[in-house]
Image (tube, rainbow, N blue to C red):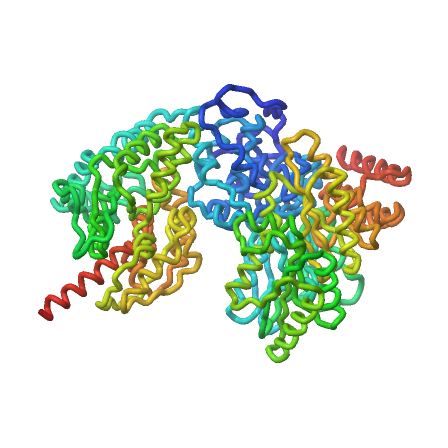
Amino acid sequence: MAERRIQSDDKHIQNLAAIVGGEHSILYHKEDLIAYDCDGFTLHKHLPKAVVFPKNTEEVAKLVKYCSDNQLPFLARGAGTGLSGGAIPINGEVIISLVRMKRLLNVDLENRRAVVEPGYVNLKLTNSISDKGYYYAPDPSSQYCCTIGGNVAENAGGAHCLKYGVTTNHILGLEVVLPNGEIIEIGKNGILDTPGYDLLGLLTGSEGTLGIVTKIIVRILKKPEAKQTILAYFDKVSDGSQAVSDIISAGIVPAALEMMDKIAIEGVEAAAFPVGHPKDIEAMLLIEVDGISAGINDQINQILDLCKKRNVREVKVAQNEQESNRWWANRKTGFGAMGAISPDYLVQDGVIPRSKLPEVLDRIQKVSEEYGLRIANIFHAGDGNLHPLVLFDARIPGESEKALKAGSACLKVCADAGGTITGEHGVGIEKKEEMRFVFTDEEIMAQTNIREVFNPNNLLNAGKLFPTPARCVEIKKERKVSHERRKVGTT
Amino acid sequence: MSSKEAPIKESPMCTTKGLGNYLWNDPPDENKWADCVHCGMCLESCPTYEQTGMEQHSPRGRVYLIKSVAEGKLEVNKQFMDPVFACLDCRACTTACPADVDVGGLIEEARGQIRQAMPLTGVKKAVNDLFLKGLFPHQNRLNAIGSLLKFYQKSGMQKIVRKTGLIHIMPKHLVEMEAILPEIKEPVRKKYKNEMVIKAKGKAKHEVGFLTGCIMDVMFSDINQSTINVLTRNGNNVVIPKNQTCCGALHVHAGDRETGRKLAKQNIEAFEDCEKVIVNAAGCGCMMKEYPELFKNDPEWHKKAVEFSKKVEDISKYLYDTGYEKPKAEIKTRITYHDACHLAHGQGIRQEPRDLLLDIPGVEMVHMPNADRCCGSAGIYNITNPEMAGAVLKSKMENVPEDVEMISMGNPGCMLQMALGVQKYGRNQKIVHTVQLLDWAYQKEDEWKNRGD
């Protein structure tokens, strides 16, 4: 890239550039910003004011303080793979991109922890310690490129959360820049369960509304001694989901238990990593068991038997690691693969009681018919986390709106079945109205009150996670805030 | 967005030939970006994103920009040009993409539009015209340059230029390149100009056409010779059609699709009578397999291009598929293998060359981490974008294992760039083409036999 001077008269751009050390660390031309007008969620778009690339915590703190002092809305962004729009600058924010803070700072095998910067890519951590027999458990499907900072913000899950838990179960400490520019540390030295409130738990999954994480202490695990993967094809969804229930009821805790339906299979088979699944089956299960070598074969046999009892058409155990990797690549690229059968897709993220799956899928099928849009289903069946993928074409006028409504209707189905509206992708912009399916206004207000403690002026990632106030109490509150903001602005 | 900039246009401009703000014929293909769902799985595969962390320098970002111009949100201008031309065209994103988005094709089409919107001027135009139009398509001129270089190396002039400091009138990255110029030998097209068919040793099983390449035959004629040796040894008659020309890859990468089409047509005709077209340069092979892309709007030539592209095969894949004699002589060496982008990502050829090398007795292969990461050569990218190419090369060299004697690969551009890397970072590996090693093993075997006789 050629050298270039700051070609902007905007004093904020010049001042922000000065903090991060010049023109190679800031973007402000429309052509450069447009790639930042959305993240993995593409139905809302807005240009940021600028994108800045700090190199360290101090620069982040200075940027935050500058934005805060000058009433500039701002937000943090990692790889931008989020699926609920958490990193979309809907208020024309200054985006603080953390991708250049991508160092692995320390690995402490003895105490089984590692310290990373927020821009460090999830899979790189496992890759860098796997030769020593360790790994980092949370494995969202985007782990090839998503950042651990983003994982913390969204409390990301993944296929193996069934046995090992989601991101929050693996975070031992955080360094956070608060919305006023102050740097704090939570969970010092990575010691578990410090006294007082569980701030780590509060920050993890706060979707970038409480502070910007600049350093993360994570737990690393010893790789399981043995691992086996099973693939099972069912002619009926009800048989497949019954088999899932049977496996869990039998006391087996698989490391992963994934399901895909017919349309999802059509997608992955048309895309870059096909494995040759039959096209006429209704459900496919991908099951992984791991643990100590002794006994693993008994578990495998037990699972095979349980599948056979539920009329499985075909069930097989991976012959080697390559085969298992192929099956997983096919599953993990499932969302992106929808591009092969549809120009656009909207992924939803409901959670349901496992036993309700056949009923929920039926009702989702009805939603699909009602809106005239195909819906594929990828399902972390073991923990009841369902991903309906609404397929649509944004070029057709009105179809994006229709897709959003269909997605919302899917979440309603999940909530009505006794579940909830997000398992791992977060609320972001996408599901904030649907928060009303599961929380009362009072409950929502209780939570925005917590946000105010950290983010009183609501300059950091405003308009995410909670619905826009509908009742007078909240409107009053907002007025009060904007009044305060004005005050700050004039001083 | 600063307040001074123009607001985004609501409705795209409509023209008969173009698309949105692409005003010229042959605009980027809408169906190609329709496959992209913005998931971001490509980010980590991209060398320029790795270096900058900026999304407009990532595959997803570039696709988005290209789409935005068609939607009328952006115009074809300098700010748009920078990320589109900073792409190495390494195609690693194509491998990473779950939806098989043809990012490379989109980039090349967009470059075509940029070059028409903003024709090169001044020195850049002169240099571009000299190399891409005046030189590469003309074998006789290339040979003349080759002879000059040979004279430069042999006459002692090279020493004088280096000693007197005259060399420092060149930009630094060109000085670095001068230092790694391979020793110039006689081009095979000159050597075999009177032979219609180079006969197979023993019984001929196949007859194949051979693309000698433009630069390849001047700078690396010894690799061309090795290719011929290996082909004839394995029962192939080799034909070198006289009117063949440069494959056009560099022109298409630079956005000159018109010249690209001209050269493509000439090659399609030149190889009309050949059943197979064997290529030993990954970049050329990939380009020739993609000729149909150039003729999307020309059904007659599109059909010919499709037929032609089916005949094109890389030497390693061809040997692997048709069978080859396993060498018996031992070459005792530790090597590593670098995947040329246009072989691995562009043509999906990864295992065949490795198997070929491992079939040579005595060859021990050490794994290179990220072997399919671009080295920064990328055609003439290392000349046009030296800064980025240097950064990409640096991270490539960090992955080259310490204890190997040779780095093998299947593309001349990579060979020059990796030689530069070896020199620049004080390493001592020899850079070889896969067929060269195979050819040496055969030669050693023959020496054995002769001695035995």
Residue B35 found in image quarter = top right
Give the percent coordinates (x, y) of residue B339: 38, 54
Q: Quick check: B450 above or below B39?
A: below
Identify the residue shown where x is 58% and y is 59%. A328
Number of numbered tags placed on the structure image:
0
Direction from residue A92 to residue B98 in the image, left or right:
left
In the image, is A54 to the left or to the right of B48? right
- Quadrant housing the N terminus of chain A: top left
**In which image quadrant can residue B354 be found?**
bottom left
Left or right for A425, reference B319: right
Residue drawn 65% across the image and 70% down it:
A304
In the visual, does A421 lie left or right of A189?
right
Viewer-closest of B109 and A329: A329
**Visible residue check, residue A182:** no
Nearer to me, A404 or A82: A404
Residue A95 in which image quadrant: top right
Up/down of A301 relative to B219, above or below:
below
Q: Quadrant of the C terminus of chain A?
A: top right
Instruction: Report the residue that reaches farthest toward the left.
Output: B453
* Whole-percent x, y for residue B425 in the image: 34, 55
**Quick one: B116 or B287, which is closer to the camera?**
B287
- The residue shown at (77%, 50%) is A362
- Residue A340 in view, yes or no: yes
Residue B191 % position (x, y): 14, 44
Indicate the position of residue B420 as horizontal and vertical percent values. 31, 50
Could you tell me which residue is drawn at 60 percent across and 52 percent down? A279
